Image (cartoon, coloured by chain):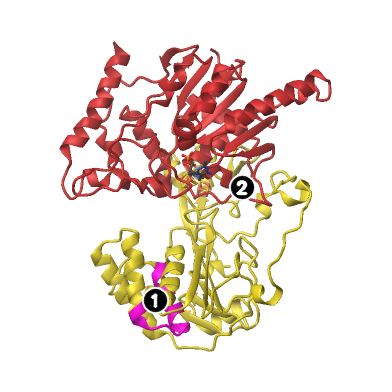
Amino acid sequence: MDSKYKTLKDMPLEEELVPGTLLCAGCGGALLVRIFEKMLGPNAITINAAGCMTMLSVFPYTPFKSSWFYTAMASAPAAAQGVRDALDMLIEKKKVDKKDDLKVLVLTGDGAASGIGLQATSAAIHRGLDFYYLVYDNEAYSNTGFQASESSPFGSATKTTVPTDIIEGSTLQKKDLFEIWRAHRPPYVATISPAYMTDVMHKIEKSSQITGPKLFIAHSPCPPGWGIDSDKVIRVAKLAVETGIWPLKEAVNGEVRHTLIQGKRLPVEEYLKTQERFEHLFKPVRKEKIIAQLQQSVDYYWKSVTK
Amino acid sequence: MITVTLRGRGGQGIKTGAHVIGTAAFLSGFYVQDQPLYGAERRGAPISAYVRISRQVILDRGQIDNPSLVVIGEESLMGMASDNPPHEISESTVILVNSPLSKSDLASRYNIKNSLIVFDLVKLSSGIIEKPHLGIAVAAAACKLLGLNFDFVKESIIKELVNIQVNRDEIARNVDLASKVFDTISPVTITTPREAYRESGILEPKYHEPAISTCAITATGNSMLRDRAQWSNYKPVIDYDKCTKCMVCYVYCPDSAYTIDSEGYPIVDYDACKGCNICKTECPVKIITLVERNKR
Ligand SMILES: Cc1ncc(C[n+]2csc(CCOP(=O)(O)OP(=O)(O)O)c2C)c(N)n1
Ligand code: SF4
Ligand code: SF4
Ligand code: SF4
């Protein structure tokens, strides 16, 4: 597809999120929300399930120039259906002009997406709801203090998976939300990374041509939760892609295509070492078994991709 | 009843500080409430926590206005007329601040007429601990002003730090520092405000239309109106002679702090910048430097 967005310089200059939020300095999720809102433009309504991003709007202040709606943790996709239906009815009754129609964006964390809100999303995709879904995957329940979610990586430390002498952080595997969503055969599902912004722009642009569920899973470094300096957010995101831990891909009607395949991948530890949540894998002694296990699962993934 | 409000930044341990004061008072035999203001306690963001201490069962709830004592974790939080929620002090409120400045400098800079106690954590911690837990240190200072016994303060610090998985060596160092801070502070008179509940009885909430009783925001993009303390003591400054107008800094700023001028150069709005330094790290030609902000 010939894209309007060839380099970073093609990014729309209009901001839909003004400054002054209470989110952490350097929040990777907030950066992606900012870019997403820019790309969708002013005619959008954001349906936000409880999580860090609901701290964007704290009464009586909001950074949003467009509409924003706060829902319970499990129900953003259900609320999106209600909003879409209301808009459609108003347009049909000629109470809202077609040109004033709004794009419906569901915004949730990974806890809501992979856990408590999974059922509502499944239902919305099944019904073919015309909406965007952006999950900022910070790989834990960040808003409540970084407890483990279904999306926390194997071996990572969270408030509820504290490494001890016998347990090396999370003993459970990260849920593969891309595959869970893809199994529904939505018209569009993609993974994105803040370190690859032209890829982000291409994917949003491409999905905007499609009616139906348009789903995005965004790697979203979280400085306090991951134990990184706020200025390293993009570096860490880039390493996740370069080590192959965070594949960049899309699936149109279920057909998977990787948007970036690297000739040579860096060892996963290059990524792990940058973050305090994996520090116990290297200190006081290297936990070779866990590191090897993490490397193997990445190698296994890419073996199935390239062949 | 004595009421204490603590102000700091997310990540400094102000919430733990409130627990330390609360637990020390509880161990001393008082009824206690201590809680952070939940909601937006983000790293670097201004946050508050509250403590109520009384000889009687405490029936008051919610935020504290006109506290007996305000504890301020760092000077940059002093200039705010209000934080979140609006935060009032009365003439009798005692103010305790961690700052390297002298009492008279602070009083004149912020036009403070209240009883003011200043201590310099950087100075006090040197030789004891490299990264002192600010919340613990201010709590120790506050406990001294509240007239609590250090034995209870120490027990409380250990309990709270064990809870947040701080290691034994760090706990010992923080206790040492707390003891030093405790000894440095001289007591002052603290007033006890009246208890709202005992004055007025139980308040029945009245029904209000949803338009009034729900938190609907009808304004758009108004968050710059929030009275915000600066988040960082440094700001990114661009060497425009070498700028290639690549827009990397603009794209990666999570806080929409950049705009692009008519010639394509990036401009930072320093009121919007939180000092995450992503732009500095990502600039491909490395021409963004950090410059200390003029203190307010
Ligand atoms: C049903 C329900 N349970 C618990 C909560 C408390 N809660 C608010 S935000 C949150 C964490 C959400 O995690 P996630 O979706 O990953 O978003 P993040 O916090 O990472 O932004 C929790 C548990 C809630 N709001 N609703
Ligand atoms: S805790 Fe993490 S995800 Fe939440 S606002 Fe802070 S950086 Fe963002
Ligand atoms: S330091 Fe962070 S918040 Fe400030 S302008 Fe740079 S990227 Fe934006
Ligand atoms: S990243 Fe550096 S070179 Fe590029 S526009 Fe910003 S300041 Fe100029």
Outermost residue to the right: A94
- The tint chain A carries is red
- Chain (yellow): B
**Residue B249 seen by the camera:** no
Q: Is label 2 in a helix, a strand or a loop?
A: loop
Q: Number of labelled discs?
A: 2
Q: Is residue B148 left or right of residue B239?
A: left
Q: Is label 1 in a helix, a strand or a loop?
A: helix
Q: Which residue is mark 2?
A: A19
Query: At 31% from the left edge and 32% from the top edge, which residue is drawn?
Result: A173
Chain ID at mark 1? B
Residue B292, image x and y in percent? 49, 61
Residue B240, image x and y in percent? 53, 46
Chain ID at mark 2? A
Residue A20, image x and y in percent? 61, 50
Q: Is residue B250 left or right of residue A245?
A: right
Q: Is residue A243 left or right of residue A67?
A: left
Q: Which residues are magenta?
A: B134-152
Residue B108 versus residue B243 in the image, above or below = below
